[in-house]
Structures are given as C-alpha cells and as structure tokens.
Amino acid sequence: MLFSLIENLERLDIVLASVSPRRFELLKQIGLEFKVIPSDFEEEIQHQSSIRDLVLHNARHKGLFVAEQNPKALVISADTVVAIDGQVLGKPENEDDAFRMLQLLSGKTHQVYTGVGLFLKEYEGLKLDTVCTNVTFRPLSEEEILAYINTGEPFDKAGAYGIQGQGALLVERIEGCYYNVVGFPLTKFFLMLKEFMKHYIIG
Ligand SMILES: Cc1cn([C@H]2C[C@H](O)[C@@H](COP(=O)(O)OP(=O)(O)OP(=O)(O)O)O2)c(=O)[nH]c1=O
C-alpha cells in the first residue's frame, strides 16, 4: 500500500469530514483506513475573490469544524463546485434548477474545482490546495436533459450531473484529473498528505 510509505501516518486516527458517498468510496479505493464525521459548516456558493478561493474557504471551514472537536486526528475535507463563464453552480435546488444548469453546460467547456483540506489541530497543522479539471459537454437536446433529470442523479451533485454515473453520456472529453470531477482529486491528495506529514513527529 502506498500509504505505508508515509511515515507516522499509521499512528493517527484519520477522519473524513464529509457526507459525500463519492469521497468515501474514493478514499476506500486507495486503501485508506478512516472514519466519517460530518461537518456542520454551511457551505457558501457566493464568490470569494475567485472560485479557487471559494472552494478553499469551504474546505477550510468544513475541516476546521471537525478538527476542533477531534484535535488528535488527521482530518480531511473537500469542496467541489462547477463553474461556467465565471458563474458558480452548486447543487441544484429542484428540477427547474437542474434543467437550467444542464442547459448552461450543454455544448460547452466548464471547470470543476475542488478544494482539499488537511488538518492536525493538536500540532496547528493545516494544508489547503485546489485542483481544476476542464469538462466539455456535447450539445444536449431538451429531451435528453429531461430524461437525465428523471434518473434522479443530478440532485446531490454540483453542476447537476455525475460523471461517474449516467452523466458519463453527457461528456465529450475531460482535461485533467477525473477523480477531481467526482469530488476528490486522489493524486493531489496523496502528494499533499506526503508533504504534510513530513512536518510532524507523532509521539
Ligand atoms: C461534477 C460532479 C460532482 N459530484 C459531486 C461530488 C460532491 O459530493 C458534490 C459536490 O458537493 P460538495 O458540497 O463538495 O460535497 P457534499 O455536500 O456532497 O459533501 P460534504 O459537504 O459533506 O463534503 O458533487 C459528483 O459526484 N460527480 C460529478 O461529476
């Protein structure tokens, strides 16, 4: 397992501060042992100074909330949004909102941003970073958009689609990390964790 190469990691309890089933599955896929403690932080969707700052802000506060209560644990957080022409798309509120989002994305390239946070409160440890992937949708007919909404997939997902599900059929190409689109950029996370753990000698 690649995590065995990271010194001291086995000494820490690892906590995922997220209710996202995708993040849970992705961290399982790479062999990490962790538990889930949801964060009560209400994420924002309004712009900070940039979209990167927005996902960093949300990842920071989601993680801090859980880190405060679990100071000895390594806490992991993330936040994903979709952006098109400078407009941020979070999760759709209802069917009309999902329709509006999918129409905006149809036939165009958009960006998926994820902010990732690592926290070790006991040592005042904090690391944050972002990843961006370009995703291009093929042109979609109204009929296709409605049929896709009927699958129920859009409702808990930023931008109203899931590339890992039937939403795969909407996508023409992607440029960058696939796992970032699903909600957790695995390679970036591994590199961040390696760097983060260099600073701590856990007794
Ligand atoms: C674009 C896209 C997003 N998503 C999902 C990933 C995230 O779960 C969700 C974005 O919402 P987030 O607010 O990032 O995460 P969440 O509310 O699901 O979980 P938590 O706040 O507890 O961490 O959209 C997909 O599953 N597939 C996709 O293709």
Image (cartoon, rainbow, N blue to C red):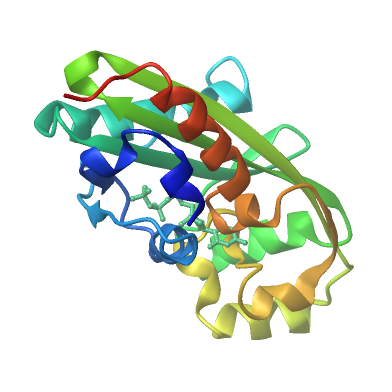
Residue 161 in percent (x, y) is at: 62, 66
Viewer-side residue, 55 vs 199: 199
Number of numbered markers: 0
Residue sitting at 38 percent across and 56 percent down?
A: 32
Residue sitting at 48 percent across and 66 percent down?
A: 29
Residue sitting at 48 percent across and 61 percent down?
A: 26
Q: Is residue 42 visible?
A: no
Viewer-side residue, 115 vs 169: 115
- Report whether 142 appears left or right of 20: right
Q: Considering only vertical position in the picture, is 193 above or below 94?
A: above
Q: Considering only vertical position in the picture, is 112 above or below 171?
A: above
- Report whether 185 appears left or right of 93: right
- Write down the quadrant of residue 41 in the picture: top left
- Write down the quadrant of residue 28 in the picture: bottom left
Q: Is residue 89 visible?
A: yes
- Report whether 187 appears left or right of 91: right
Residue 61 in percent (x, y) is at: 32, 27
Q: Considering only vertical position in the picture, is 140 above or below 19?
A: below
Residue 104 in percent (x, y) is at: 75, 54
Residue 30 in percent (x, y) is at: 49, 60
Figure quadrant of the C terminus:
top left
